[in-house]
Image (cartoon, rainbow, N blue to C red):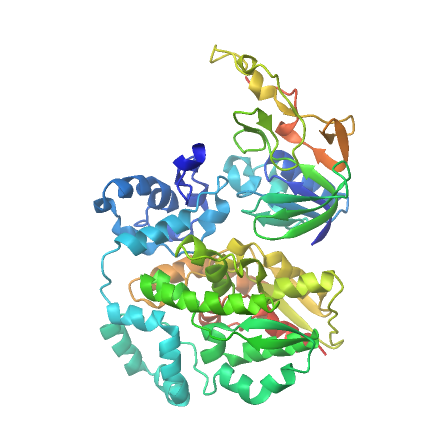
Amino acid sequence: MRYDAVVIGGGRSGCAEALRRASDGQKVCLVAAGLTLHSLEPELKGKPYSELHNLTKAGIAVLRGDIVEEVLWGATASDPVRAVKTANGITLEAAEYVLATGRFFSRGLVADMEGVREPVFGADVDFPEDRSKWFDPDFFAPQPFESFGVKTDKAGRILKGGKPVENVFAVGKILGGKHDAGR
Amino acid sequence: MQDANISKLNFEACQKCSLCNEVCPMMAANPLYPGPKKAGPDQERYRLKDPEFYDYALKYCLGCKRCEVACPSGVQVADLIQKARLEYAPASKHPLRDAMLANTDFVGTLASPFAPIVNEVLPLKPVKAVLDGAFGIDAHRTFPKYSAEKFTTWFARHAKKAQEGFDSHVSYFHGCYANYNYPQLAKDFVKVMNAAGYGVHLLEKERCCGVALVANGFEKQARRQAKVNIASMGKAVSKGEPVLTTSSSCTLMMGREYGEVLGLPTEGYRDSLSLACKWLYEKIESGEVKLKFRKDFRMKLSYHTACHMQRLGWQNYTIELLRMIPGVQLTVLDQNCCGISGTFGFKKEYYPYSQKVGSVLFEDIRTSNPQAVVTECETCKWQIEMSTGIPVLNPISVLAAAVE
């Protein structure tokens, strides 16, 4: 299916981004692994988040319970993304893609023996090689791994192999360098 | 390394967030049901230790799979519950009734030749009272009508020859409902496919997909029938034909549950199995198919996303396809369960829950006041027609009425 934008991730940032783009008149598809934010956080049902109820009313195609499994790249790896394929077998084509999959808990970032990676597009991730610098032994101190995230250029496009991918943007917690411990 | 420690149904990944409980329609209607989180991943740990821990209340699970859609961690909650029921559930108190409800092929073959009589007799009050008292089929429930001529008979007599005039073909899994009860749907499918420039082949052998057998605990028979379907679909796919269906539950059963619940190989056909609406939309989008619609077609419709359709995640294809028809005024209803859950709502002990679960949807439908409700699921159709009095159509029937 063809859209102006495909937003991957149904949390706060993903929903906000989808709504912003829809209100600009774009045809938007939102892919959410589970439910979307409004159903996830009942305490947000009041203002100022009330607009989040209205994803479908804003004309956004919401794919609940689905994840992006495969990325169809252009001819070379640095080319823009042509389409993404979901676990339910849906091919989504769009002019722009927005990565809003969050950090570790939502598996926007995955840490394993090799390091930290971003599983959807394989974007460059900002983290120190030295594992001992990933965390602070003091449990209550701000933890360094909380500021890991994908690298972007100034326009918010993700970097892959050091080069920006023309049509993939990142928003929300998956962005590197942010720190929200103690919030 | 870690993979070896993770079960196939992924229950270790449960974070106890309770989103599944939030969306469970049965939990909201029935305080006796512990909810998908407890019934699925929580109790699985105990069941693995000792089958004694099997909770009788699992019988209330509708199998709607909304918990799986809601789960952000990919736990197959409903499959866990279904598998536990197949393995540990005590024998049914109404074995004959369950067998009658689940064996759609057998009952359909039996009822079809006597359709005019069966259709007259089943709605009679004394008959309903007997079914209620002796069998445990609730007297409030309306039975679907049987057709005097099966679809397969009609196809062989009137349509088969004409199909060879087309260059490309699709294979059609019609399902029991279109064959025994409502052949018009299958005829509509043939009409739409022919209008799209494709001929229709039937599968070499087709059995009921077995969704009702699994729900009623007849695992062995389900597996037997599944093997027949898998072989037939594999043959169609090897000829280069996609296998199309018009029922969301059959599609989910064959595309997913054959592998996940029955443990059968699905690789041979899985990617070629599709709902007719999804396949059509993709063909139209790629420009391979053009459908010409009547200019004078007018209809006010409400789309109901059946639970299994939501699990497939393909509802947007149908919605967009319906929006392509000029003259269709479409309301997309909020995603609520109708409550019937196949054979579940026929059973006397569950009927009240079934209606309670569906009440939200019925109210929504009445408010939107359509000429017809559109949904892919045949049992939703029975439930909605019985409970609201508003006719329910398969999207393929809408397309058939709208094409030139």
Residue B248 drawn above or below residue B17: below
- Where residue B388 appears, as percent x and y from the top left, is 48, 69
**The quadrant where residue B400 appears:** bottom right
Is residue A87 something one can see in this rendering? yes
Q: Residue at the spot x=43%, y=69% of the render?
A: B228
Which residue appears at 48% of the width and 10% of the height? Answer: A138
Q: Position of residue B226 (x, y in %)?
A: 42, 65
Q: Quadrant of the C terminus of chain A?
A: top right
Relative placement, left or right, of A170 versus B340 is right
Q: Nearer the viewer, residue B116 or B384?
A: B116
On screen, residue B30 above or below B295 = above
Taking the spot 34% from the left edge, 64% from the top edge, the residue there is B351
Q: Is residue B218 visible?
A: no
Percent across and percent down for residue B282 are 68, 61
Question: In this picture, is B253 found above or below A155?
Answer: below
Numbered marks: total: 0
